Each structure stands twice: as C-alpha cells, then as structure tokens.
Amino acid sequence: MMYELPILTYHRIISRNAEKGKDKIFVSLKNFENQLKYLKTKGFDTITFRDIEEENITDFSKKVILTFDDGYKCNYQYAFPLLKKYNFKAVIFLVTQKKFNNWKKHPYEPLFPLLNKDEILEMDKYGIEFGGHSQTHPILTEIALDNVFHEIRGCKNDLEQLLNKPVFSFSYPYGAFNNNVKEIVKESGFKYAVSTNAGAKDFRTDTFCIKRINISPKTNIYSFKNKTSGKYLKKKNIFTLLNTH
C-alpha cells in the first residue's frame, strides 16, 4: 500500500472552554501540542504547498501538511508558538476582506477575530505559507460566476500585495466547489486547491481537488496516529466500500 501524504485540516486552537464556539471546529491547546509532539517524536517533517512547488518534492514519506482554514487570531496566539517550539511549518488559508468570522455557519457561533497584517507578516517571515480562502467566505457553488471570479482572483491579489510574493494554494470555503469554480481557481494562477472530504486518494491525481483529513475535538492521540499513518484514506475507502455492499 503506497504511502499517502497526510494533509490535515484545523481551524481554531483554544486554551479554555469559553473559546469553543458552536461549530466544533476547534482543537484544544493541549491536544494540539500532543499531536505536534507525536509528529516530532516519530520523525515527521512538516512541508507546505510552496515547498512542493519550489523544491519539487516527490518523496512524501514521513511528511505531513498542517493546514488551517479562515485565519483565526488564535493561529498566531496559540498555534504559532508551538509550531516554532517544534520547528514545524503550516499552511493558513485566509479570508482577506473580513476581520471576524461573521459568515457564521452556526446561528449561535460567537465572533472570533482573524489575523491582522502584522501577525501575518511575522508568520510569513518564519515560514508559514499563506493561501487563499476567498475574500468573504461565501459558498462558491451558490453565487454567480462573476462573483466567484472576484472572490477568488481578488483574494489572490490581496494576498500577493500583502506578502509581495506569489501565492500557490487555495481552500474552497465549506469545501464546496464544482468544475466552474475549479477552473476559475486554476485560471487565477493557483497551483493547488484543497477541499474537505472530496478528492482522489493521491493528491497529485488532481491538484485542484485535494482531499484533507479533519482533526476535530474528538481526535484523540490514537486516532491522530491513524490519520497520519500514510494509509488512513485508503483504509477509510476500503472500510466504506465493504460497508456499502
């Protein structure tokens, strides 16, 4: 069974219960550090899509990509110090025209602040990759194509003006995309686009439909080991196939 590159999805890192929110898109600070400690102990390297593009990496054994959607301030407050502690990198997908998560998927989700310019530039200087996540976080499959274009191209322009470098990667808000959305992402100059559960087992099969592995509040260390084994998606697909026949 060929090793698959684990591409993990995070959103928020929290240090206390009051920061949980309603959407269940958080991981506790303690669990996040335990996960990083496990990766370090087992000899994993964290890479980014920029690394793949610029260094032409083809051997993904013992490598993992840590991704964060939306660009919450807690990524700077809590995740960034731990990433530096373990000498790890990550990819953060930014919503570029918002200061808070006021798209609010859950009606009672609190407002959480997003990263500011100084925080983004400090993390970029360290080696965190920043990718696009649209300008305002719409469901791209439910808006007019002209608006899809402005959301995606505008996001890329926002980031490249801020960072003064090319931006390679994009994350579909809510994981929602179709062929038209994919084509606009590609035409806008992105090289990689990640979803949630959709995509091929090997991300190189379609770099604009990359499947990720969600890390949730319920992901204990044993589940995390399984999800970073390099075999998780294949085993999950086999399990699903067996249970649908």
Image (cartoon, rainbow, N blue to C red):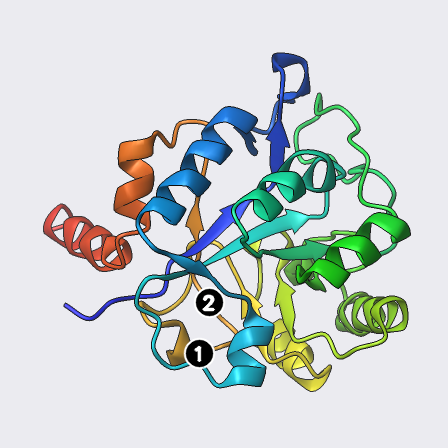
In percent of width and height, residue 165 lies at 79, 77
Residue 30 location (% of width, % of height): 50, 25
Q: Read off the residue under disc 1.
A: 206
Q: Secondary structure at mark 2?
A: loop
Provide residue 214's location: percent of width, then percent of height: 44, 45
Q: CA distance from mark 2 to mark 1?
A: 7 Å
Q: Residue 89 bears which disc, if any?
A: none
The amino acid sitting under disc 2 is Ile
Q: State the quadrant of the N terminus.
A: bottom left
At numbered mark 1, what does the secondary structure look like: helix, strand or loop? loop
Disc 1 marks a residue whose amino acid type is Asp
Question: Badge 1: how crowded within 10 Å, few (<14), some, or many (20+)?
Answer: some
Relative placement, left or right, of 127 versus 203 is: right
Q: Is residue 220 above or below residue 154?
A: above
Image-based side of 241 in relation to 28, left or right:
left
Which residue is found at the position 38% from the left and 82% from the top?
Answer: 58
Q: Name the residue: 59% across, 29% down.
A: 23
Please indicate, yes or no, whether residue 95 appears anywhere in the rendered image: no
In the rendered image, which residue does mark 2 sit on?
A: 210
At a point 83% along the width and 69% down the height, the residue shown is: 163
Evaluate whether residue 118 shows in this view: yes
Q: Horizontally, is 230 left or right of 38 in the view?
A: left
Q: Quadrant of residue 41?
A: top left
* Label 2 crowd (10 A; few <14 / some 14-19 / many >=20): many
- Can you say whether 141 is above or below 98 in the image? below
Q: What is the count of numbered marks?
A: 2
Q: Quadrant of residue 178?
A: bottom right
Q: Position of residue 224 (x, y in %)?
A: 33, 40
Verify CB contact (< 8 Å) between mark 2 and mark 1.
Answer: yes
Q: Residue at x 63, y 70 (%)?
A: 169
